[in-house]
Image (cartoon, grey):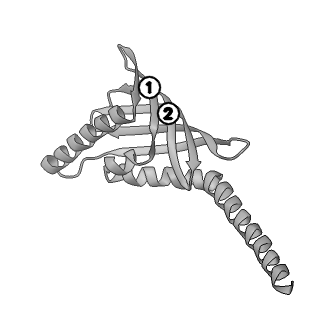
């Protein structure tokens, strides 16, 4: 009888420990904090600074969608891209930048991104992030305002959706 009681206590203790581990994994692996959101954008800025299109694409969810309204002095266009199209376009752009850099040496490029606000969902699994950014290269300046939706799922933080308005023009 003594062995049966000890065995039951062991099983109950084991069940409690397993439940605690599962709870920590679920809650900890799927919840975001403002600090994690800011760290995510710091990683994106670092990848942008070294023109690492692969690292930037790894920050996007498989079902990522981007909607952009591009405004210039004479025209306006709207585009929607999925992850595959966005990453292909990003790879082409970064490749052109690397080719220019190889021919001209260091390209004077200025990129500044500012997080305006972070709104965490009630369950903490997603965040809406309001951003503004400026990109300047010789002859061109782009200013954008946008909103990203990011999520944390199984310890991984990814962008699921981006919506932005970009103003592009000559850099005087």
| Residue at the image point whose x is 38% and y is 17% from the top | 77
Specify the quadrant that holds the C terminus: top left
- Residue beneath label 2, please? 162
Q: Locate residue 85, reporting x and y percent.
A: 33, 32
Front-lying residue, 123 or 132: 123
Specify the quadrant of the image occupied by residue 139: top left
Looking at the image, how many numbered discs can be counted on the residues? 2
Query: Mark 2: few, some, or many residues within 10 Å (few <14, many ≥20)?
Result: many
| Residue at the image point whose x is 49% and y is 54% from the top | 42
Which disc, if any, is residue 68?
Answer: 1
| Residue at the image point whose x is 68% and y is 55% from the top | 27
* Residue positioned most to the top: 74
Query: Mark 1: few, some, or many residues within 10 Å (few <14, many ≥20)?
Result: some
Q: Is residue 104 visible?
A: yes
* Residue positioned most to the bottom: 2
Helix, strand or loop at label 1? It is strand
Disc 1 from disc 2: Cα separation: 8 Å
Q: Locate residue 87, reporting x and y percent.
A: 33, 38
Vertical comparison of 115 with 85: above or below? below
Specify the quadrant that holds the N terminus: bottom right
Front-lying residue, 25 or 160: 25
**In the drawing, does residue 72 fall left or right of residue 99?**
right
Is the residue under label 2 in contact with that under label 1 (CB below 8 Å)? yes
* Residue positioned most to the left: 103
Front-lying residue, 124 or 67: 124
| Residue at the image point whose x is 82% and y is 80% from the top | 4
**In the drawing, does residue 134 fall left or right of residue 16?**
left
């Amino acid at each position: 009888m003594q062995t049966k009681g000890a065995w039951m206590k062991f099983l109950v203790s084991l069940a409690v420990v397993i439940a605690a581990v599962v709870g920590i994994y679920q809650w900890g692996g799927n919840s975001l904090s403002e600090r994690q959101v800011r760290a995510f954008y710091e990683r994106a800025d670092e990848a942008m600074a070294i023109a690492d299109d692969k690292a930037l694409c790894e920050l996007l969810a498989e079902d990522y969608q981007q909607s952009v309204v591009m405004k210039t002095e004479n025209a306006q266009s709207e585009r929607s891209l999925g992850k595959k199209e966005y990453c292909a376009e990003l790879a082409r752009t970064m490749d052109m930048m690397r080719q220019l850099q190889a021919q001209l040496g260091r390209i004077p490029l200025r990129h500044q991104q500012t997080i305006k606000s972070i709104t965490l969902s009630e369950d903490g699994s997603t965040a809406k992030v309001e951003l503004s950014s400026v990109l300047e290269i010789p002859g061109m300046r782009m200013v954008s305002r946008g909103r990203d939706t990011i999520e944390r799922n199984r310890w991984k933080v990814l962008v699921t959706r981006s919506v932005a308005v970009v103003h592009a023009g000559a850099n005087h």
